[in-house]
Amino acid sequence: MDELAIRAEGLGKRYRIAAPGAWHDSLRDALTDAVATFGRRSGRAREFWALRDASFEVRRGESVGIIGLNGAGKSTLLKVLSQIVTPTTGAATVTGRLGALLEVGTGFHQELTGRENAFLYGSILGMSRAEVSRKFDQIVDFAEIEEFIDTPVKRYSSGMYVRLAFAVAAHLDPDILLLDEVLAVGDFSFQNKCLNFARSLEARGATTLFVSHNMFSIKTLCPRVIYLRRGQIAFDGPTEEGLRLYEADQPLQAPAWFQQQEDAPIEFTAVELLGMDGAPRSMFDFGERMRVRIAYRARRSVRRPNFMVAVTRADNVLCCNFSTMTDGVEIASVEGAGVVEMTTPPLRLTSDSYVTTVLVRENRFDAILQAQFGGRFQVRHPLFERVGFGVYHEPADWRVDPAGALETRIRA
Amino acid sequence: MSAIESGLQATSAGLRPRTSGQVTHIRPSRGLFDLGLPSIWRYRGLLATLVKRDVLVLYRQAALGAAWAVIQPVLSVAIFTFIFGRVAKLPTTGGAPYPVFAFAAVLPWTYFSECVRRGALGLVTEAELIRKVYFPRLLIPLSAAIAPLVDLAIGCVVLLAVMLLYGVAPTWRLLALPPLALVAGLLGLSVALWLGPINVRFRDVKHTLPFMLQIWMYASPVVYAFSMIPDRWKPLYALNPMVGVIEGFRWAVLGAGRPDLGAMAIGTGVFLALLGGGLVFFRRMERSFADLI
């Protein structure tokens, strides 16, 4: 049983990042640049290791989650293993038929019908024509697009498009499957379908490497994780431990949707979650208040800044968003270092794990100048949990009238 | 082994993690002459699908559909006939009617230039695919050389009609057309093998290509006869490998003239060098496509 599916030794991928202007998209630029730098080294390109010295082994039938922040090298690793890019150093041996799903629907052609695209996409993923023919009915069934199968996909809704693409991919049936964040698309019911698909693969004994930002699906699918930090393997082992390390690294990071600027006009130097006594806390009882202290430094004068604190549940549901502006706090401008402190109303969130994100916008609701994770906290309550109680719980006013007098009064 | 034991093995085989036994080695460097041709064979299904897609897509949105395969060469020949046949009164091989003379050259030329154009630009057109999926990149220029064969086949039927219209009798020499078309396709492929990777790096190719092909056409005996070239320039002229292909087409269609064996030998040499060098060059550059596109 300990036969290897993947064995990687010292895999590395180096990219040369060109300094602004050093990238030639036309021959003319290349020529002028060659003349200008003739006789001396250009030195404008910067080297960058997207993946460095990655060695690991994956046994057959194993499910391994690959976690890490954006740009940590997760996708590069999958691209190297699927032969899309060539490694700069190291070597890897892959035993078995490998299927890589780095993006759902790559290669779909708008002018072709659903049927034609199913065959096209199937062969792009490595299936033979006969194989697609054999599984065709199942694919159409899975995608739930029977009546539109002979319609050009340019007339499809985005949901239908993704469903068809995923249906084809789901019938690929490889020995080793590389999945990159593909389960993150589509609506909730579709995501569930994808999750079930990934589980069924595991049941069939396929080896899976699964990149995701969704820690929930990593936890359910993979007993083992590889945690990449700046291109290097920071941890390789049991999921629980890996996730703990990953989460511990999080507070300093910007959220994935925010494009961090090199020299942002304002930055957060520290964000602390405190109890009402002013001591740092990460566990709050239901109904307690939480204090968020934000230390900032503004490089230039920021006019009418709007500080915001968003609270997001572990499964990425935005629960609430506090803002100085909506709460009627007007700040004329800030410059240099300073502190903003906010105290929440009594926490009515159900028992779960939450992340705070602090943001600042300029001029009330203009561009977001800075955004950063502000730390994690748990809310504790013996009864009010996400399952069954939803996002928050507030006591309501009830009237109980067993005799039915209330109903009569309403009618009257 | 008892029956029970083998039965047990069969059940456990169903549960055991599967493997197809296919082993892939991933490493940074590869031999210069490792052309990876076996993997092309393994991906022949995808090649067939890509070709089919290109053919389907080409005519799906055009109102006149496949009629374009007829209209395009007929229009070019009509224009050439007017300008070079009527106005300039260029002599034809063996005094053949100018339309047939031109048609026999326009067909292989159009096919060749389509192979070059689609093959050279295809890598960038398929950028999304190259960034997200692995397959031998050679499939792209290869499918670009196969898909226009449909146009060529339709064109050949039209050619036959034009021949009959102008009273040129078909002979057994027409059997030479398929191998000549193969050479034209391989030649187009070899040029694409050079231009494709360059286009990935420098998008200038896209802008230069139309001029390059036009100049190349006038440097080939498409509108005039090979015999019009002065003898002392012929060896130089024959460096253009399309000369042999087009003259071959004319020989097969008109039944007149004799292929210049010396010119063909020179052309074949250039052609083989282009193809061999192109394959090595393409394989060498292929490794960085996904990084550069």
Image (cartoon, rainbow, N blue to C red):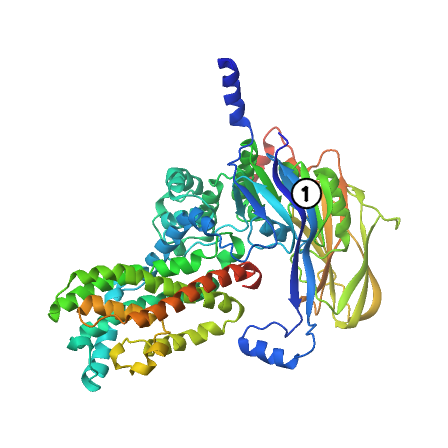
Say what amino acid the circle numbered 1 marks.
Answer: Phe
Nearer to the camera, B252 or A84: B252
Image quarter for residue B210?
Answer: bottom left
Query: Farthest residue toward the left?
Result: B167
Kindly identify the residue that appears in the image at 35 percent across and 45 percent down: A147
- Location of residue B17 with respect to A289 vertically, above or below: above
Left/right of residue A82 with respect to residue A235 in the rendered view: left
Q: Which one is nearer the viewer's eye here, B278 or B143?
A: B278
On the rendered structure, is A219 left or right of B281? right
Instruction: Give how far across and how far down residue A380 sits, in percent.
Output: 76, 39
Residue B24: x and y, percent? 55, 44
Question: Pointer 1: what residue?
Answer: A56
Percent across and percent down for residue B236 are: 37, 78
Q: In which quarter of the image is the C terminus of chain A?
A: top right
Q: In which quarter of the image is residue A218?
A: top right
Compared to residue A286, the image places residue B165 above or below, namely: below
